[in-house]
Amino acid sequence: MKYADKVNDRLKKLLLVPKYKGLQKTAEAAAYSLNAGGKRLRPELCLEICRIYGGDTQKALDPACAIEMMHTFSLIHDDLPCMDDDDLRRGKPSCHKAFGETAALLAGDLLAIYPFEIIADCGFSAEQRIEMVESLSNAVGLYGMIGGQNADTLSRPETVGELVGTYTMKTAALIRASCEIGCICAGAETKAAEEYGENLGIAFQIVDDILDYTSDEKVLGKPVGSDKEKGKATVFSLCGLEGAKDLAREYTAKALEAAAKLPDNAYITELTTKMLTRIN
Amino acid sequence: MKYADKVNDRLKKLLLVPKYKGLQKTAEAAAYSLNAGGKRLRPELCLEICRIYGGDTQKALDPACAIEMMHTFSLIHDDLPCMDDDDLRRGKPSCHKAFGETAALLAGDLLAIYPFEIIADCGFSAEQRIEMVESLSNAVGLYGMIGGQNADTLSRPETVGELVGTYTMKTAALIRASCEIGCICAGAETKAAEEYGENLGIAFQIVDDILDYTSDEKVLGKPVGSDKEKGKATVFSLCGLEGAKDLAREYTAKALEAAAKLPDNAYITELTTKMLTRIN
């Protein structure tokens, strides 16, 4: 079974909708977004990095799912009217469009907290689990994803350097943590995998920006050009399409260089190359 | 120095506003709500329970502050327009009124994640830290605070039993966890302290309901009767003022009974009695 299938199966078991009516709507909203067909890039990275360092991928499945939940939390809150105000996500109504704002807010909150419960309960040593908590909370906090959202929505990056800094926090920090947590699961040194994850994450966000401007709405699953409409700074608005493509190539090259330092890296290398040429 | 003063000092040091403009607004909004003059009941309980079980309260200060941050996260998100839509909190503009909805959403998110970073980095053993992560995430998750919010806002409790169940999740779970984490800091058995915290938490929320109906706006620091206006079920709407007072007395008696099982419990007993007679 492929990683993504295992992750999808496990996510469904981890987030069951309770029988008590008073708890259902938040859980349903969270499950809706969690099962909306993401690429599962972050858990896949976590599991593959765990495997190449000789770890037990079955045991790593719960931390990998915890990371995907954290990612989904960020998507749900990002789509809210007070953030990006997006009605569509992966071709379906975004969480607040399907369940209302109250349930979407609470579903996001739930998917921000539950990952820590899952990690605290998983089968690794206390030392490994607390290292995972540290890595994940760090990647999501003020100098990670949440700070990146601040930089992206409440302050406008003015240079390519600032924009790359924003992307490092907003997107690359959690992708880096996915790789780091894969290493922690395997009891391996994390440095090379973190370097890989960070560069991949930056490249990934630049490609996202390019797709926002050049893709077809049906292929992308959300309105094209929505960043531009909101007056957001993107790599495209700061250095044009060719400049953006150059930057994506630069960071993909850096990621491939870092990937070359990893053991048994054929799949990781393939995945990295695929990221640059993906269409949605 | 009193517990609350130590907590206030430490909270200011734990949440510094970064120099980089792109990160400031979220941190400022979080610090605004965190330093808005709460009672610090939860950290106080954590520290006092740690002390009575012979633990090091200085070392327990960071986990205690982490709990207060988690509480503040819930207040910020609760006040948002899609939740209770409250303009005032502790006599001041609520976070989204002062900083806008985007910053308030992100500030809440930050204060939901940062507690785990603080616990992961604090001075206790890996076993103790992961137990704290488990206790805290459990208290906040679907069968804790977030589930309680769902039951309170998206589904209307119809009996006193359902309402007490909602309060157990919405309010008592985090107060219970504060007591549990105090025990974990001291390396003590948690059962008696958890029983105490749960009953205190339920009594506390019932008193809050009563105050919402009977208090003076200036004393309460928020509009009186706001629960009724929103058509929310409260203990007052379900069993009237006298019934509500009886229920508050019942749970305070249960809390005092549990407190009697704790060692060196003079301060805890005083605090519990004070809770029933507080005016805001």
Image (spheres, coloured by chain):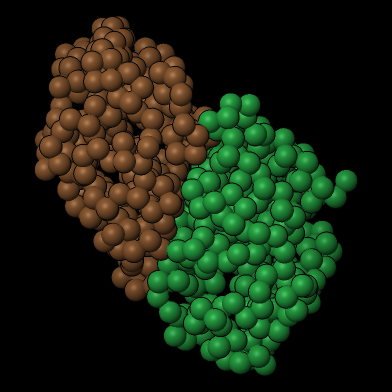
Chain colours: A brown, B green
Left/right placement of residue A59 relative to residue B199 reads left
Q: Quadrant of the C terminus of chain B?
A: bottom right
The spot of residue A21 in percent (x, y) is 34, 74
The spot of residue B134 in percent (x, y) is 50, 47
The spot of residue B256 in percent (x, y) is 73, 73
Identified at 32% across, 58% down, the residue is A96
Q: Nearer the viewer, residue A196 or B215?
A: B215
Q: Nearer the viewer, residue B39 or B177?
A: B39
The spot of residue B95 in percent (x, y) is 60, 54
Identified at 66% across, 74% down, the residue is B223
Left/right placement of residue B75 relative to residue A178 reads right
Q: Residue furthest right?
A: B1
Q: Is A199 located above or below residue B108 in the figure? A: above
Q: Is B185 located above or below residue B83 in the figure? A: above
Left/right placement of residue A228 relative to residue B219 reads left
Residue A95: quadrant of the picture: bottom left
Identified at 17% across, 39% down, the residue is A220
Identified at 67% across, 48% down, the residue is B32
